[in-house]
Amino acid sequence: MLKKGDIIFIIATILACVFISVITVKGTGSHEAVVCVSVDGKETARYPLSEDRSVLIEGARGLKVNLRIHENRAEVESADCPDKLCVHQFPVKKEGDSIVCLPARVMITVRDSSDTGGSETDKGENEPDAITY
Amino acid sequence: MMSTGKLLRMSALLALSLIIGYVEYLIPLPVGIPGVKPGIANVIVLICLMFYGWKEAFLILLLRIFLQGFLFGNFFGTVFSLFGGILAFLAMSGAYALNGEDERLKLSIIGISMIGGVFHNIGQTLAAAVLIDELRVISYLPVLMSAGLLSGALTGVLAFYLKRPLEKILTEYRGGSHDRISER
């Protein structure tokens, strides 16, 4: 049923699969998850998700946001903003997940270590379209 | 043009492939790229290839892609299918042409089908990379190539076992009063 040429093709395809997966994984670096902090649309800091730490982020208008990285999760422990929505948001750990504090214009995102994060930290994203009081 | 008998048989095959394609279309596959299906409908293309030849198979392939696209497909799905289908066909016919005299290196219909399956998915991935403007879909290639290999093998085996039963129905035979009209 199967001829020799078929077998050759199967082996060639499997080798190609292995080859491509090696290349693509290598391209994304060490696949380390990184917590990116941006204030006013500009990236100010990056911390590895794997290391526990507490960081005080200086947000806009003097509002401070307390970022805590613990057990491979990032969350806002406390913040000076009036609504404290950021504190109530779930801790993030997956790439792409984010916590935002609008009054302080702080955005905390989980990214891959090789990702320069150009698409999502555009200045426009962090600027609210309008603010109501 | 082709004989009436052949035209009728190919039309029936085409209709059959659309039905198979419709059933496949109802099965959603959890892959990131839209329009990826098991591709069992391509058994018809293989059957056409076995019994009638490359040109006929290509015709059935194109017709199936377009008709399926119009009947129950979306634009992007059809474009992906077209990309994949043409690339697959080029690969299959190219591989067959390169088969050479060495009997040991020959490809069976299963091998040709596997080549078709793999290259169909490669074509779809490339089309997605271009259309969605995201080169990172290339990372899906290993999974899709393996899937293509598998589905190609499945379709090929199906065609392999269908060959004998279909021989009587699909090949034109001379003789018999009903055939005299189609001899042109």
Image (cartoon, coloured by chain):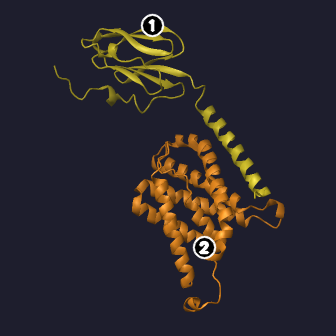
Element carrying mark 2:
helix
Question: Residue shown at 83%/60% (left/top)?
Answer: B104
What hue does chain B carry in this figure? orange
Is residue A107 visible from the viewing direction of this image?
yes
State which chain disc 2 sits on.
B
Instruction: Choose mark 2 or mark 1, whichever is in front.
Output: 2
Question: Which image quadrant is residue A100 in?
Answer: top left
Q: In which quarter of the image is the C terminus of chain B?
A: bottom right
Q: In the image, residue B157 lies at what x, y percent?
A: 67, 58
Please name the amino acid that badge 2 sits on: Lys
Question: Residue shown at 27%/12% (left/top)?
Answer: A81
In the image, which disc is placed on residue B55?
A: 2
Image position of A27 with respect to B23: above or below: above
The residue that disc 1 covers is A54
Q: In the image, residue B43 lies at what x, y percent?
A: 59, 62
Q: Report the front residue among A34 and B87.
A: B87
Note the chain letter of the yellow one. A
State which chain disc 1 sits on.
A
Mark 1, Cα crowd under 10 Å, few <14 / some 14-19 / many 20+, is some
Question: Which image quadrant is residue B99 in?
Answer: bottom right
Q: Report the front residue among B25 and A132.
A: B25
Q: In the image, residue B23 lies at what x, y percent?
A: 47, 56
